[in-house]
Amino acid sequence: MRKLYPEALSDKSWDNTGLLLEAPFDPLRRNRNSVLLTVDLTRAVADEAIEQNASIVVAYHPIIFKGLKSLTLANSQQQSLLRLAARGISRFGAIIDQKRPTVASSNRVIRASRSVCREETAVHVAASPFDEWKFSAGKTAHTRQVITPVTNVPGLEGAGMGRIVRFQTPQALTSIIERVGQGLGDPKGFPIAIPQGSSVDEIKVSSIGICAGSGGSLFSGINVDLLFTGELSHHEALAAIEKGQVVITLFHSNTERGYLHSVMKDQLLDAIRDEWEYLRAEERGKPGLNDAESEALSDDSVEVEVSERDRDPYGIIIAQEQ
């Protein structure tokens, strides 16, 4: 994880990245060589990790944000951590903040009107959760730029939070909405805000600001036609439409989860396979290995799975016509 998504890219004023829970190795109850990816570590996801006998949970959002004076079962989130530790499962926090100029990073692409918009927070910056998701680059001529560049990490030029996409030719908002829907699997609906007195059919979009998760502070002051993010506050959305901007929000984690499936899973699997082969070759020749250690090193299997129980807390209910 640290090689793919350097922790130096994360916003330490908020993000708590890295190994947040290190479970001890128990040779009498060896876990599978498997990783479970999730956006949030909930009770349901903890159950899933325990059922799978995973070795580690990699979560996009940290579950520990500040210092703890105690760890008890009375707190539901602490309960999940304690249950994982008791079953030998570690927990890694991987908030993705800025992006590096790689397929995984600058291509957190949003298929808006047949063009690509890439988004942003160490996985947000190193690679954009929004980008390579179900949105792919199309033929519409466009340019891209980072909203807030990260300049203090050598070798990662081009990394930064958020993306602005500018089209050479204005695109119909209806076309962009269609592309967003396709990327989401054609849902019944999703939230959109447009300026009062306007209609969706008549609006043209020449530029889009993109940020996975919550884009409010990042979008402050940018001059674009459409803001595309997971969530904005009530007043941020009002301010945007008063300025003539369109807002599309998909709920916070819905803009991040697709990245786990389409990019991180394969990236991490390839990296772990290489690392595990190197480690096995290095350790197996050492004298004094006990039976449990030899058995662990003989297992060449590696798996990375995306949680099937992780979901955004919000959904949309479509009322049936009477």
Image (cartoon, helix red, strand yellow):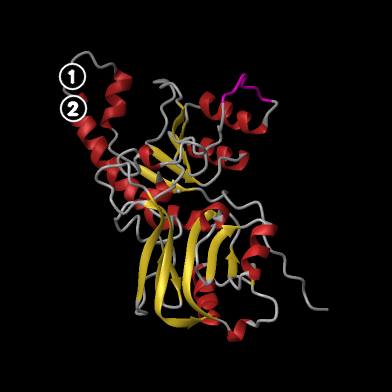
Q: Is residue 139 visible from the viewing direction of this image?
A: yes
Q: In this figure, which residue is indicated by the disc labeled 1?
A: 286
Total residue callouts: 2
Direction from residue 195 to residue 260 in the image, left or right = left
Residue depicted at x 36% and y 38% = 8
Q: In this figure, which residue is indicated by the disc labeled 2?
A: 282
The quadrant holding residue 135 is bottom left
Q: Which residues are magenta?
A: 67-73
Q: Is residue 54 visible from the viewing direction of this image?
A: no
Residue closest to the eye, 298 or 200: 200
The quadrant holding residue 304 is top left
Q: Is residue 105 magenta?
A: no
Residue depicted at x 52% and y 42% = 61
Residue furthest out toward the top: 288
Q: Amino acid at mark 2?
A: Glu
Q: Amino acid at mark 1?
A: Lys
State the predominant SS element of the stretch in magenta: loop
Residue closest to the eye, 110 or 85: 110
What is the x, y in percent for residue 273?
27, 42
Direction from residue 229 to residue 133 in the image, left or right = left
Measured in 3D between alpha carbons, the distance from the residue under mark 2 to the one under mark 1, in whole angstroms, is: 8 Å
Residue closest to the eye, 208 or 304: 208
Q: Is residue 71 magenta?
A: yes
Residue depicted at x 44% and y 47% = 97
What is the x, y in percent for residue 131?
41, 61
Query: In the picture shown, does residue 105 fall above or below 76?
Result: below
Query: In the picture shown, does residue 133 fall above or below 266?
Result: below
